[in-house]
Amino acid sequence: MADASLRRDGETSTEPSARRAGRRPPSPRQVAKNAETRRRIVEAAGIVVGRHGYAGASIARITAEAGVAHGAFYLHFANQQALFDVLLPELGGAMLDSLTAAIRDSRSLEDIERRGLQANFAYLADHPEIYRVMNEAELYAPAAFQQHLKEIQTRYVRSLRRSRDHGGDLHGFADAELETVAALLTGARSYLLMMFCRDGNAIRPLEPEKLQTYLDVFLNGLRRR
Amino acid sequence: MADASLRRDGETSTEPSARRAGRRPPSPRQVAKNAETRRRIVEAAGIVVGRHGYAGASIARITAEAGVAHGAFYLHFANQQALFDVLLPELGGAMLDSLTAAIRDSRSLEDIERRGLQANFAYLADHPEIYRVMNEAELYAPAAFQQHLKEIQTRYVRSLRRSRDHGGDLHGFADAELETVAALLTGARSYLLMMFCRDGNAIRPLEPEKLQTYLDVFLNGLRRR
Amino acid sequence: MADASLRRDGETSTEPSARRAGRRPPSPRQVAKNAETRRRIVEAAGIVVGRHGYAGASIARITAEAGVAHGAFYLHFANQQALFDVLLPELGGAMLDSLTAAIRDSRSLEDIERRGLQANFAYLADHPEIYRVMNEAELYAPAAFQQHLKEIQTRYVRSLRRSRDHGGDLHGFADAELETVAALLTGARSYLLMMFCRDGNAIRPLEPEKLQTYLDVFLNGLRRR
Amino acid sequence: MADASLRRDGETSTEPSARRAGRRPPSPRQVAKNAETRRRIVEAAGIVVGRHGYAGASIARITAEAGVAHGAFYLHFANQQALFDVLLPELGGAMLDSLTAAIRDSRSLEDIERRGLQANFAYLADHPEIYRVMNEAELYAPAAFQQHLKEIQTRYVRSLRRSRDHGGDLHGFADAELETVAALLTGARSYLLMMFCRDGNAIRPLEPEKLQTYLDVFLNGLRRR
DNA sequence: AATGAATGAGCATTCATTCAT
DNA sequence: AATGAATGAATGCTCATTCAT
C-alpha cells in the first residue's frame, strides 16, 4: 500500500486512541479480525464501485458484498466519504507499485514505455474494477484523485529523468519540461485505454499496431531536439 | 404525456405534440414559447452542472435556475437522464464547431495544434461550465460522451489527413494510424488541461513553455518516420 | 394563534419567495390545500407527541397520522426541529388565548385565580396532548419553551397589575415583585397539575379542597403586607 | 448473564452473581472491583446527562466517560433504561439527604424555607448535572421521577407538620392540606429555579429580593387562616 | 403548456444490545 | 468480569417523478 498518510483523513481510527490505565489490551486475534473486516469492506467497495460506480456504491451494497452487517461499516470508517477517500490510495496504490516494479530497471525510454504500458493494461485487465475507481475518483474523491495524479507524475518524471541521465533519449529536456512530458504521456496512455481498450466493464489489450504508433510517435518526438 | 415508448433515447420530442389526428396545429407563438422554455432549461442545466456537477443537478435546482416550474421540466424531457443525454451534444457541440472553425484553413500540423489548443482553452475560459459538462459526462451520460469522443476523433482525423495530404508532416502515417494519433493528441491535451489549467471551477491559460514542449514533442514525433 | 413571528424560524416558506415575471400565480384552491396539509401535519404532530412524546414523534408516525406521504412533511417544514419549534406556539398559543379570555374581566385576584385555574385544567382535559407538548418542549424546543414561559409570565403580570390597580389585593407589591409572584403562582399551579391531576395521558380535575387550599394560601399571602 | 426475568425493574443485581450452587464466592477484591465499576458508570452517566441530557447519554458516551469497555455496561445494568431508572435515586437521593440535613432543626417555617431554599440552590450550584438528571427524569425515568417527587413531598410534609406542631405558623392546616401546601412550595421553588437561576448548564443564586418576595408571600399566606 | 404540491423509494447514519474471546 | 467488534432495526432527509388544477 502506497502511503499510510493518505489514509488518515476522516477515517475512524482503528487503534484505541488512548491506552487507558487498567484496560485489557486487545487480543491479537481481535486485532486481526478487525483488520480483516476492514479489508473485506475495502475490497467489496472496489468491486461495487467497479460494477455500479461510486454513485451506486451504497453502504448497503458494499456491506452486503463484504458479508458484514450494515452497521459494521461505521466501525471502520467515519462515513461513506472516508471510504471513498481511501479507495483509490489503497487499490490504485497497489497498481502504481506494480507498474513501478515493472519498469524498475528499464534504461531506455522505449523500455519504460513498452513495459509500463503493457504492465498497466495487464493490471487493469486483472483488476477491472480499478478503472472506475480511478476514473470516477476525480468526482467522488477529488483530493485522493489529485494525490494519485501527483504520485503518477512524480514516479513518471523520476523514470524519465533516469532514462535521460543514463540513456540516449530525452537529452535536451530540462527537468521542468519533463513534468510536461509526463503529463503528455499519461494523458495519451489514458485515452488509448479509454478509447480503444474498454469493453463494458472489462479491459481488453491494446492492439499491437496502436501500441507501435504510440511508441513511434513518442520515441521519435522525445529523442532529441 | 405522449407514449414514452415511442421515443428514442428518453428524450421528449421537441416538435409540438400536435399533428396528431384532430388537433389544431400550435400557433407560432406557442411553438416559440415551447422551444424557448426548453432552451432555458438546457442553458440552466449547463450552469448548474458547471456549478454543482451532474450529481448536484437536481430538477429542482435546474428549474429554479431556469425560472420555470418544477413540473415544466417533464413537458420538455422524459426524465432527468434525457436532459443529461442532451447536454453535452448541445453545449459541447458548439465548442467543437468553434474549434473546427478556428483551425479551418490550417495547412501545417503546427498551425492545427497551436491554434486548436489555444482556441480550446480560450473557449473553456469563456464557458467554464463546459468543462464539467464534458468531464462528468463519461459518468452521467455515457452514450453522449462516447458520441462526443467519436466526433472529436472524426474531426481531428480529418484535419490530420488534410494536413498530411497538403503539408509536410505526417507523411508515412496511414489513415488507420491517424486514428491512434488523434487519440494521443486528444489525451495529451486533455491532461494538460486537467493538470495545469484548472483553478477551482475556472480555467486558466496554459503556460507558454508547456505549450511549446507539447508542440516540440508532437511536431518532432509526427514529422516523419 | 399567538404570534406569527414565532413561526418564522427554520420553517420552509410556503409562499413563493419571489413572484417571478411570467409565472402563473397559484390558484386559491392550491393555496388552501397547501395550508390545509400543513395544518393537518401540525395537528397530527400534537396528537403523536401527546401519545409518544417528542422522542417518539418520528416523521413517519406524524405523516401517517396526518394521512400524507412521508415526503410531504418537507414541503411544509425544513426539518423535524422546525416542526417542534412551531408546535408549542401553535398549540399552546391557543391555550393561552383561551385562558386570557377566561379571566378577561376579572377584577379580584380570587377571580383571576379561580377562573384561570379552572379554565386551565378544563382546556387540558379537552386537549390532553398539550400537556406533553408543553412539558417536553423544555427539552425538544427550548427556545419555544422559553418564549412560552415569557408569554405566560407577561400575561400573568398584566392581570396581577390590573387587579392590584383596580381591586383590593396586592397593593404594596411593586411591579418588579409581581414578576416573582407570577412565577410562584405559575410554579404552584404547574405542580398541582403534575402531582394531583395526571392520570396516564389524561388530565382529571383538581379536587375542590386542593383548589381551596391553593386559593387560601395565595389570597391570604398576597393580600397585603 | 443471570436470568433477567428474575430481576425487578430491569436492574442487574448488584450482588455478586455467585451464591448459586457450586460457585466459589467472589473474592472481596472482585466484589470491590465490581461495585467500583458500577459506581463509575453511574457517576459518568450523571456527568454525561448533565452535559448532553438523557437523549445524548448513549452507552458509548457513558462507558467512555467511565473509562470502561462498552460491553461492561451490560454486566452492571440490564439495559439503558435500568441505568436511567437508577440515576435519579442515586444522585438525587444524596441531594435530598443534604437538604433534609440543612433544615433538620428548623423550628419555624421561615427557617425551613430560607435554609432549605438556600441549601437547595447551593447544592445545585455545586452539582449542576443534577438539574438535568432531575428535570429530564420525568421523561426518561418516569417511575423514578414520581418516586422522587413523592420523597420530596413526604419529607416536606414532615417538616411542615413539625413546624406546625412546634411553632407558630401553619396552625389551622390539617394534615391533608399540608400535602397541597408542600406541592405549592415545591412548585414555586422549582419555577424560581427554572426561570431566574439558570444560566446555560450552570445554576446561579436567586436574587435576594426574589427570595424575600417568596418568603413574604408564603409566610404571610401560611401564617394562619 | 404551465404550475407546484404530493408521492414514496432509497440512502446515510446512529445506537442499544449481543457475544466470541 | 471485561473487552470491543458485530449486528440490524430505526430514523431523518432527498429527490425524481406524477398529477390535479
Image (spheres, coloured by chain):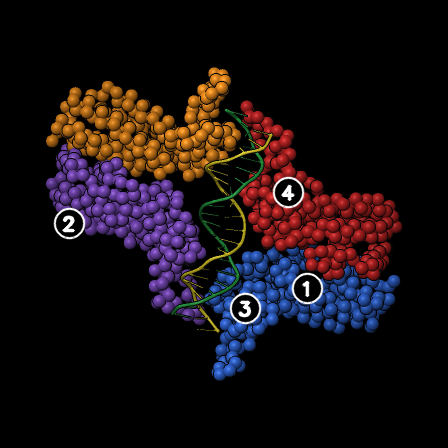
Chain colours: A purple, B orange, C red, D blue, E green, F yellow
Gap in angstroms between the C-alphas marked 3 and 1: 21 Å
- Characterize the local packing of mark 4: few (<14), some (14-19) or many (20 or more) Cα atoms within 10 angstroms: some
Residue under label 3, please give it. Answer: D77
Of residue D95 and residue A45, the one placed in the foreground of this image is A45
Total count of labels: 4
What is the three-letter code of the residue carrying label 3?
A: Phe
- Residue B84: percent from the left, percent from the top? 40, 33
Residue under label 1, please give it. Answer: D146
User: In the image, what residue occupies the spot 38% across and 51% down?
Assistant: A62
Residue under label 4, please give it. Answer: C40
Q: Are marks 4 and 1 on the same chain?
A: no
In front: label 2 or label 4: 4
**Residue A33 shown left or right of residue D50 in the figure:** left
Query: Farthest residue toward the front?
Result: B21
Q: Quadrant of residue D106?
A: bottom right
Gap in angstroms between the C-alphas marked 3 and 4: 42 Å
User: In the image, what residue occupies the spot 36% across and 59% down?
Assistant: A37
Q: Are marks 3 and 1 in contact (CB under 8 Å)?
A: no
Q: Give the chain letter at badge 2.
A: A
Indicate the secondary structure of the residue bearing disc 4. Answer: helix
N-term mark: 3 or 1: 3
